[in-house]
């Protein structure tokens, strides 16, 4: 199985021991969607799907440790794609070493039931790096994006969670131009 090494399929895998014992959210699942194969990861609050290409002999059903995909990315220094062999376990060859990663026990959450279907009502295009910088500047735990329509700038309002940064709603906000001239 191959994937673009600039992408990190394991980045969103849950780092904490799974609270629901039957779910395998600590790993990366191989899923079929819309005629393609993807590597899915979730921490229970967000989900990512990274397109991959299956190789002959791959038997990819199951959930695999994120460490296998991290090792594959590191081993692909001079290549555009990282490679993991999936056949009962995940195997990565790097620098003359052959490393095996056992499958993760449990069932991955239902990706088909999570991914929205149909056409979106609204599309917002934003530079995530700017958004992260604004969140930091505002000392926020998260942000609310307010779209006033007609391609106007987006209002970025800080969200302070209980026990978070200790900030209070003091009227602070940010303004961000949408990418592509409109929202």
Image (spheres, helix red, strand yellow):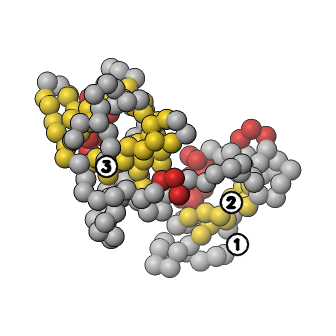
Q: Is residue 59 visible?
A: yes
Name which of mark 1 and mark 2 comes first in the sequence.
Answer: 2
Q: Which residue is mark 2?
A: 145
Q: Nearer the viewer, mark 2 or mark 3?
A: 3
Residue occupying the point 41% across, 50% down = 41
Residue occupying the point 71% across, 48% down = 119
Image location of residue 74, percent across then percent down: 29, 33
User: Dot 2 lies on which element?
Assistant: strand
Left or right, residue 146 beside residue 137: right
Q: Nearer the viewer, residue 133 or 108?
A: 108
Left or right, residue 121 beside residue 141: right
Name which of mark 1 and mark 3 comes first in the sequence.
Answer: 3
Q: Nearer the viewer, residue 181 or 5?
A: 5
Q: Which residue is mark 3?
A: 63
Q: Residues within 10 Å of mark 3 (few under 14, many from 20)?
A: many
Q: Disc 1 versus disc 3: distance between alpha carbons?
A: 45 Å
Residue extending furthest top?
78
Q: Nearer the viewer, residue 150 or 1?
A: 1
Residue 154 falls in image quadrant: bottom right
- The correct choice, above or below, for 127 with respect to 166 in the image is above
Name which of mark 2 and mark 3 comes first in the sequence.
Answer: 3
Q: Which residue is mark 1?
A: 171
Q: Nearer the viewer, residue 102 or 129?
A: 102
């Amino acid at each position: 199985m191959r994937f673009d090494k600039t992408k990190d399929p394991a980045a969103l895998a849950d780092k904490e021991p799974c609270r629901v014992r039957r779910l395998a959210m600590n790993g990366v699942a191989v899923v079929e969607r819309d005629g393609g194969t993807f590597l899915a990861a979730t921490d229970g609050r967000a989900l990512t799907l990274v397109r991959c290409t299956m190789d002959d002999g791959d038997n990819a059903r199951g959930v695999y440790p994120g460490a296998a995909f991290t090792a594959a990315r590191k081993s692909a220094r001079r290549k555009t794609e990282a490679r993991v062999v999936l056949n009962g376990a995940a195997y990565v060859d790097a620098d003359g070493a052959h490393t095996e990663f056992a499958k993760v026990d449990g069932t991955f959450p239902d990706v088909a039931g999570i991914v929205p279907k149909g056409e979106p009502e609204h599309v917002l295009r934003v530079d995530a790096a700017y958004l992260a910088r604004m969140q930091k500047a505002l000392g926020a735990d998260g942000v609310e994006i307010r779209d006033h329509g007609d391609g106007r700038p987006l209002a970025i309002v800080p969200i302070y969670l209980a026990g978070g940064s200790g900030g209070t709603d003091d009227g602070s906000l940010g303004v961000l131009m949408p990418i592509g001239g409109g929202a």
